[in-house]
Image (cartoon, coloured by chain):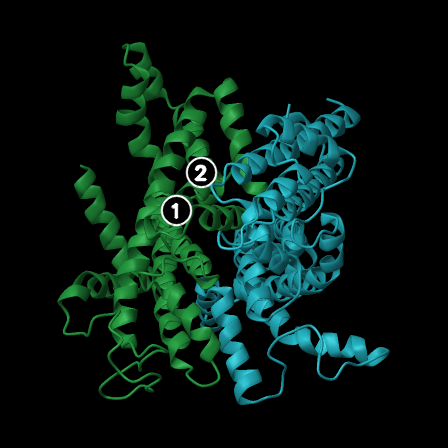
Amino acid sequence: MSLARYIISRFFQSIFIILIIIIINFIIISSAPGDPVQFIAGDIAIYNPDLAAYLRAKWGLDKPLYERLLIYLTNVLRGDLGYSYRYSEPVINLILERLPVTLLLTVSANIMAFVIGVLLGVYSARKIGGKSDTFLTVLNFFLWSTPSFWLGIILMMFFAVDLKILPATGLIDLRNPKTGIWFYLDILYHSILPVTTLTLITIPLYYKITRDTVIQQASEDYVTTYRAIGFSEDVIYRRYVFRNSIIPPVTVFGVHMGFAVAGAALIENVFGWPGVGRLLLDSISTRDYPVILGIFIIIASSVVLTNLIIDLLYAILDPRVRIEKR
Amino acid sequence: MIFEGFIETFKKLVKDRYGLAGITILSIMIIIGVLAPYLPLPDFNATIFHRFIPPSPDHPLGTDYLGRDLLSRVIWGARISLLAGFVAAGIASVIGIILGTIAGYYGGAVDIIISRIIEIFFVIPTFFIALTLAAIYGSNIYLLMIIIGVTTWPVTARIMRAQVMIVKEFLYIEAAKAVGANDLRIIIKHILPVAIQPAIANSILLVGNAIMIEAGLSYLGLGDPNYPSWGRLIYEGQPYISTAWWISVFPGIFLVATVLGLNFLGDALYRILTPRISNIRT
């Protein structure tokens, strides 16, 4: 298969997967027993049938399911994710408003976790079986087993409630709003705790895979050969083993980046971080279906596209991939 | 023969540092959970004490915002969280093993369909799907177990598929086919006993994963309000972290310890049951 044909076929596969995801989500959400109209039109006590009927017609909820699905799909293809029931604003605007805030949290945490995790993983692998390796391994097991929200609460208790050196919640200091450069520094200041929490939770992902890969690489024949030639351990590791071990963690990094737009809903919830994750949680609790669907589509597309890019990079770098996938 | 294999695996586990730590922690938690109804504790929902009593001899872990004894709630929490974890992981493992085996054994169109489904599960945020389902269909602990089970099976399926694809090429499978054994018999008698080990190790990791997901859902207020799972206890304590830290801290310690034990155990099992993991990974 030629590279061009491979790219085209992977591209259409990706589109197909996104389409399936939209349909599945649409069906799950539409089959829900609850009625979104009731959330807006109010309780039975103050329920106004005329208003409910008006809203139902306005949102097309009086049409059969397949017809709604078709309308929705055509709209999505045109880049229109519909209007929020609750905010009466285009869904895409609601998401784009919160996306930078979420990316600040997830992207910076992912990058820091990658750097720290890979460095610790390489270090651990070189000291395999030693005290520092055992310590790091157990520490990573702990972080892997800790729920993000609980770690967030503990850090908040310690640094915000007890020591009072960091703000507990929010994106900016609402009581004392800053301007200019101080506005951004304020955001940075508020992001310390959530970013630290997310970084700590994500480190084990990179630590484990790096350590495993380096250990496996270090047992390869070429390492023995280089040792026999007389290369120093530092040179062998830095120049050869590390370079051969970096692909798996980089792949994980890429895949994880795809999920970055999903935010870290649990951590956003702990720290009152006004990101996409929180928007999703709020939309779920208020049955704001267009927003839920819109966010799912954005997440799925971002993950699928990241995977596609990773696959294509592989195909370009390593011709064997194209042959295997046939 | 299966029993002997079990004893042998257990012996190896006890010799492994992480395996031993995992078994110890998990056994303690399971014993606590099983014995919960027989321990001399106040009822976990009885609001009969003062509110916000700090940890003290009468209430080793303090009381919560409604005046309920936290020790009793945390111990009952072990029962709820472990039950939820094991049932959900059980559901996920059964689905994953069956679908993975079918895909790996039959190949062709069946494999393509199942693999695509697995692929879709890997790109959708399953936690949010679980969240949406829990929000839509109500917060019932049994429903949560099913929801977690049906959203976490793909990893098992992928492992199982890869394993079966390797094992089905072995000569003795060919021989079994030659003497006319049917597919079901070949799969159950000849393939699964050889291929299932990594899926078993994975199912232990799934238990920890399921406990974490249940905790996450409960923390967002979607847990079953009638049962004090650890996630729910942390959720209940969050508004009071500046005045009554113990309500959120203690359940969290139990939760982390349990999941840590499960991860130790699952990881050790993986190493013991699949000595050359790198060859088997997809």
Q: Are marks 1 and 2 in contact (CB under 8 Å)?
A: yes
Query: Residue A250 location in percent, x, y?
Result: 66, 52
According to the image, label 1 marks what residue?
Answer: B202
Residue A67 is at least partly visible in this image: yes
Amino acid at pointer 2: Ile
Q: Are marks 1 and 2 on the same chain?
A: yes
> In the displayed image of the protein, which residue is found farthest to the right?
A180
Amino acid at pointer 1: Asn
Q: Which mark is residue A134?
A: none
According to the image, label 2 marks what residue?
Answer: B159
Query: Residue B2 location in percent, x, y?
Result: 20, 38
Q: Secondary structure at mark 1?
A: helix
Callout 1: chain = B
Query: Residue B64 location in percent, x, y?
Result: 34, 78
Give chain B's shade.
green
Give chain A's shade.
cyan
